[in-house]
Amino acid sequence: MPRGTLELPEDIARDLTARLGATTEQDTSRGMFFLGVLDAVRFLGGEEAVARVLDQADEKADYVPTQPYPFPRFLRLSYAAAWQLAPQVGDFESAMRQIGTQAMLDFLHSMFAREVVQQAGGDPKRLMELMQAGYRMALNFGERTVEWTSPTSGRISMTRTLMPVPYTEGILRAALEVTGVHDVQVQGRALALVEAVYDIAWS
């Protein structure tokens, strides 16, 4: 969806329904991402907020970080969490960015990304290139390509990306910021429901 359209409850519900229709039980995400959603909620709202999100999504907090789980469950949990966090961080899209940020921080500290981070050696371009392959170990779907437009900017194209644009903006911003670069800018644009491009830059 275009930026700023995930505002009304009916728009958010419609977007979730469409994404659930585009995914299957065979699409999976590791448990660390589920735990990251709950960590984001816990940080701002405490255990009571976590309990409400779990109840709304009909989930239990018994995820194993390395175990794959059906991605439809992650979609429902993330949308419930963003809805819970929205009043505290500004709006639904800001909440999704925060959840995406937490997801990337958890990923970069996981066994799946440890070697990727070491190989990147603090180089943001190298990290972006390596991360596309590393991320595949945590998600079993989607394709991601990077095209560099200058020494400090580029465009990342994603197909079959099942999360909304703000979530992925949070992921990319967090990945760039951990390398120590400044003035990070991430601008996503949906081309279709599960296809988007992201212009990134830093100084």
Image: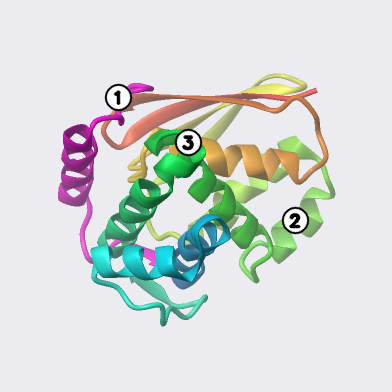
What type is the residue that disc 3 sits on? Ser
**Where's residue 162, x and y in %?**
33, 45
Badge 2: how crowded within 10 Å, few (<14), some, or many (20+)? Answer: many
Residue depicted at x 41% and y 34%: 91
Badge 1: how crowded within 10 Å, few (<14), some, or many (20+)? Answer: few
User: Within the magenta stretch, is there residue 151?
Assistant: no
Left or right of 128 in this view: 52: left
What mark, if any, has residue 5 been given in the picture?
1
Q: Earlier along the polypeptide chain: callout 1 or callout 2?
A: 1
Left or right of 156 in this view: 190: left
What type is the residue that disc 2 sits on? Val
**Where's residue 180, x and y in %?**
83, 40
- The residue lying toward the viewer, choosing from 45 and 17, is 45
Badge 3: how crowded within 10 Å, few (<14), some, or many (20+)? Answer: many
Location of the N terminus by quadrant is top left
Q: Which residue is mark 3?
A: 94
Q: Which residue is mark 2?
A: 117
Left or right of 20 in this view: 60: right
User: Within the magenta stretch, is there residue 28?
Assistant: yes
Q: Which residues are magenta?
A: 1-30
In this rendering, the label closer to the viewer, 3 or 2: 3
Gap between marks 1 and 3 measured at Cα: 12 Å
